[in-house]
Image: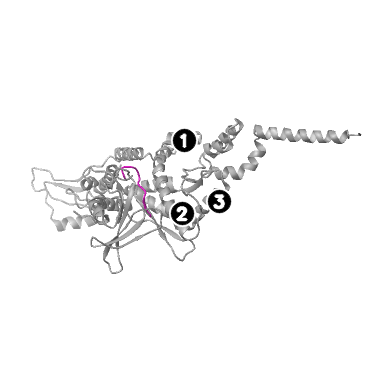
């Protein structure tokens, strides 16, 4: 079994067990005494997932079974045409979730908290978080899971960095009862090429060499600094959902090219005549055939054996396979004849609206992981003397799915909501034009107050106007007593 090349079909590797397995333990607290045993009990899950993850990652990059295609009939014509739709699928899914920066937004109407959240976002921009999000998103979509980790920097512009560990050497162990992560493990090599494991609990880090803890110490990340980002609860890859369809498309396209080539390089049939190889080669170069009958009673015949493949029917079948793949993955079709429909009608017909709805199902998983990442970042900042005095209850995670789409309709909706007396903050959140609705509201508050008066504002203005009138009356009729 060749694990370094994708020579086999994916089904032959997983044998129907789709999705990545999750490592569970019944241990609630990881200590120096039990960490080796916990890892030993769960390492089998990691070793089971590793070849599957490697297969899917190589498949995404173009190493697909069609590259190793073999033929028994006309093996001299064996095209190996690959249409790497796996790359197209993964890039689309990554763009949906991480195409716009994932940001933290304030949940409270507090200027101090708002400024602290803005500063947290600035730190993450300096750490190139979106670049890491995209890199991790590729692993997430292609293999079913991914990881991000926080590392402390002593001398740097910011006190931490974000890295994306490979799922080929990283896994997380969860408690079976709480389903909370209790330990993250990495398989690493030192400068001499010797393997060792680094494990992180919520309070401690362990270095393990040859199944022995050689180093154990407390850390100050405030939680496990390696966070898993699953693609879905079953850790299903976007590729494996349609991998049979993708293989069929590659096979069909290769057979189509074989059909074209076999039509051009057709067999020549000789009936009742003999031609030796040397004479035949000379006649091919001359472009003519001269043969003699071997029997006077039977007429000699030379014919080209041709059977052209019906390319139209092949294209229909291929389009059907790809349409089914798009439907399973909720990816919009690229229809060109949109006519004079509005953008909303086109989005509904071509599947864009359904695609956004499907993408939002992943949001809760990403938000949960982002909150865990934020805890590690905030504690790292606190230890380095840059305490933002924030808790995870002060902010939320904002994932923007093409906020500027259908902008005119959204702005019209905002105007109607404001005219109906809806609170401006609720109206701004409802239309979804801005990633940070709270910040947009606070920056726009003075303008909104000028355009949209509340009852309290009107009563206050009426009271002030009455005071001005009273003062004017007192000035016109002074007291002469």
Q: Main secondary structure of the magenta part?
A: loop
Left or right of 421? Residue 287 is left
> Disc 1 designates what residue?
346
Q: Residue 463 lies in what quarter of the image?
A: top right
Left or right of 270? Residue 66 is right
Tag in front: 3 or 1: 3
Q: Determine which of the numbered discs, if any, sits on residue 115 in the image.
A: 3
Q: Earlier in the sequence, mark 3 or mark 1?
A: 3
Mark 1 Cα-neighbour bin, 10 Å: few <14, some 14–19, many ≥20:
some
| Residue 256 place in picture, x, y as percent | 27, 45
Q: Nearer the viewer, residue 17 or 424?
A: 424
Q: Nearer the viewer, residue 458 or 121?
A: 458
Q: Are marks 2 and 1 in contact (CB under 8 Å)?
A: no
Q: Earlier in the sequence, mark 3 or mark 2?
A: 3
| Residue 455 place in picture, x, y as percent | 65, 32
Can residue 395 be found in the magenta stretch? no
Q: Is residue 23 above or below residue 416?
A: below
Quadrant that contains the C terminus: top right
| Residue 196 place in picture, x, y as percent | 27, 62
Is residue 79 visible from the viewing direction of this image? no
Q: Nearer the viewer, residue 21 or 325?
A: 21
Tag in front: 2 or 1: 2
First to last magenta residue range? 225-236
| Spatial CA span between label 3 and label 1 | 40 Å
Is residue 343 visible from the viewing direction of this image? yes
Mark 2 Cα-neighbour bin, 10 Å: few <14, some 14–19, many ≥20:
many
| Mark 3, secondary structure of its residue | helix
Q: Are marks 3 and 1 in contact (CB under 8 Å)?
A: no
Q: Determine which of the numbered discs, if any, sits on residue 312 in the image.
A: none
> Disc 2 designates what residue?
378
| Residue 4 place in picture, x, y as percent | 24, 56
Left or right of 16? Residue 424 is right
């Amino acid at each position: 079994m060749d694990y370094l090349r994708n020579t086999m079909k994916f089904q032959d590797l997983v044998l129907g067990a789709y999705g990545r397995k999750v490592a569970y333990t019944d241990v609630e607290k990881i200590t120096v005494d039990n960490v080796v045993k916990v890892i030993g009990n769960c390492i089998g899950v990691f070793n089971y997932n590793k070849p599957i993850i490697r297969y899917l990652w190589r498949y995404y990059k173009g190493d697909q079974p069609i590259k190793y295609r073999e033929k028994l009939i006309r093996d001299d014509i064996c095209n190996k045409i690959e249409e790497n739709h796996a790359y197209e699928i993964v890039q689309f899914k990554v763009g949906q979730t991480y195409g716009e920066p994932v940001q933290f937004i304030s949940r409270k109407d507090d200027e101090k908290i708002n400024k602290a959240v803005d500063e947290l976002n600035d730190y993450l921009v300096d750490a190139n978080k979106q670049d890491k999000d995209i890199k991790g998103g590729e692993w997430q979509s292609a293999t079913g899971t991914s990881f991000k980790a926080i590392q402390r920097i002593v001398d740097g512009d910011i006190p931490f960095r974000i890295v994306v560990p490979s799922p080929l050497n990283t896994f997380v162990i969860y408690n079976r009862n709480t389903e909370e992560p209790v330990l993250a493990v990495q398989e690493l090599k030192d400068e001499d090429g010797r393997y060792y494991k680094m494990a992180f609990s919520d309070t401690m880090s362990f270095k393990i060499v040859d199944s022995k803890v050689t180093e154990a110490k407390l850390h100050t990340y405030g939680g496990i600094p390696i966070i898993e980002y699953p693609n879905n609860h079953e850790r299903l890859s976007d590729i494996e959902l349609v991998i049979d369809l993708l293989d069929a498309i590659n096979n069909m396209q290769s057979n189509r090219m074989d059909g074209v080539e076999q039509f051009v390089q057709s067999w020549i049939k000789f009936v009742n005549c003999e031609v030796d190889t040397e004479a035949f080669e000379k006649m091919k170069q001359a472009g003519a055939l001269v043969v003699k009958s071997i029997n006077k009673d039977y007429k000699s015949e030379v014919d080209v054996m041709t059977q052209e493949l019906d390319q139209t029917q092949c294209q229909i079948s291929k389009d059907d396979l790809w349409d089914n793949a798009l439907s399973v993955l909720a990816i919009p079709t690229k229809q060109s004849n949109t006519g004079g429909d509005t953008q909303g009608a086109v989005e509904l017909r071509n599947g864009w609206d359904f695609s956004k709805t499907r993408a939002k199902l992943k949001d809760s998983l990403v938000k949960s992981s982002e909150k865990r990442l934020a805890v590690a970042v905030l504690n790292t900042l606190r230890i380095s003397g840059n305490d933002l005095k924030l808790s995870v209850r002060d902010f939320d995670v904002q994932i923007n799915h093409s906020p500027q789409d259908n902008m005119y309709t959204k702005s019209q909706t905002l105007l109607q909501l404001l005219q109906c007396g809806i609170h401006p903050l609720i109206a701004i959140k409802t239309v979804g034009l801005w990633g940070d609705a709270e910040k947009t509201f606070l920056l726009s508050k003075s303008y909104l107050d000028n355009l949209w008066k509340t009852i309290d504002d009107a009563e206050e203005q009426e009271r002030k106007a009455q005071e001005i009138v009273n003062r004017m009356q007192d000035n016109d009729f002074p007291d002469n007593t």
